[in-house]
Image: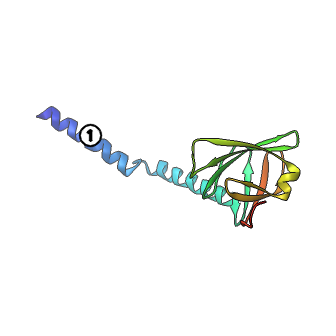
Amino acid sequence: VLLFSVLAVLVIGIFYGAYRGPWDKSFRNRMEQRFGSFQKELSSRMQNDKMTLICGQPLSTEKLKLIYHGLEKGRLKIAIYILELDPESAYHYQLPIKEAKKGFRIGGQNFVLESYGKNQIQLRLRKNQGES
């Protein structure tokens, strides 16, 4: 009976600790600050209809997750995850810069390339006005 009581107290303590989170207030405060700075950084990358893709860092919209992989021979390399279709499979696109500036359609959404560089690009989400 004593063994089962000790085991029950340990199990309850572990589940209570996992549910309540870290007991160390300074650790909890650091985690909340990091999460807050992450949220600010993410919101600064998506403003209204413009989004900034940084090389190697994913950015999600309602329907898509986009990852910019840099420039190669005058082409933008972008990986697209269509979240409604298959969030685990990437579709890799290589878009010529001239074509991207005119506008392109990926995953059912229209984009226009605003600016580009080796480490980041800025895209503008264009409202659906037929095919582009």
Residue located at (57% from left, 46% from top): 87
Residue located at (61% from left, 53% from top): 38
Q: Position of residue 57 (x, y in %)?
A: 68, 45
Residue lying farthest front? 131
Q: Is residue 111 left or right of residue 13?
A: right
> Image height check: is 113 above or below 24?
below
Residue lying farthest top? 3
Report the number of numbered marks.
1
Q: Position of residue 77 (x, y in %)?
A: 77, 43
Front-lying residue, 16 or 112: 112
Residue located at (66% from left, 56% from top): 41
Residue located at (34% from left, 46% from top): 17
Q: Position of residue 37 (x, y in %)?
A: 61, 55
Q: Amino acid at mark 1?
A: Val
Q: Is residue 124 left or right of residue 60?
A: right
Q: Is residue 5 left or right of residue 124?
A: left
| Residue carrying label 1 | 11
Q: Position of residue 7 (x, y in %)?
A: 21, 35
Q: Secondary structure at mark 1?
A: helix
Q: Is residue 31 left or right of residue 48?
A: left
Color theme of the render: rainbow
Image quadrant where residue 9 sits:
top left
Q: How crowded is the residue under tag 1: few (<14 C-alpha within 10 Å), some, or many (20+)?
A: few
Q: Quadrant of the N terminus?
A: top left
Front-lying residue, 43 or 2: 43
Q: Quadrant of the C terminus?
A: bottom right
Front-lying residue, 45 or 27: 45
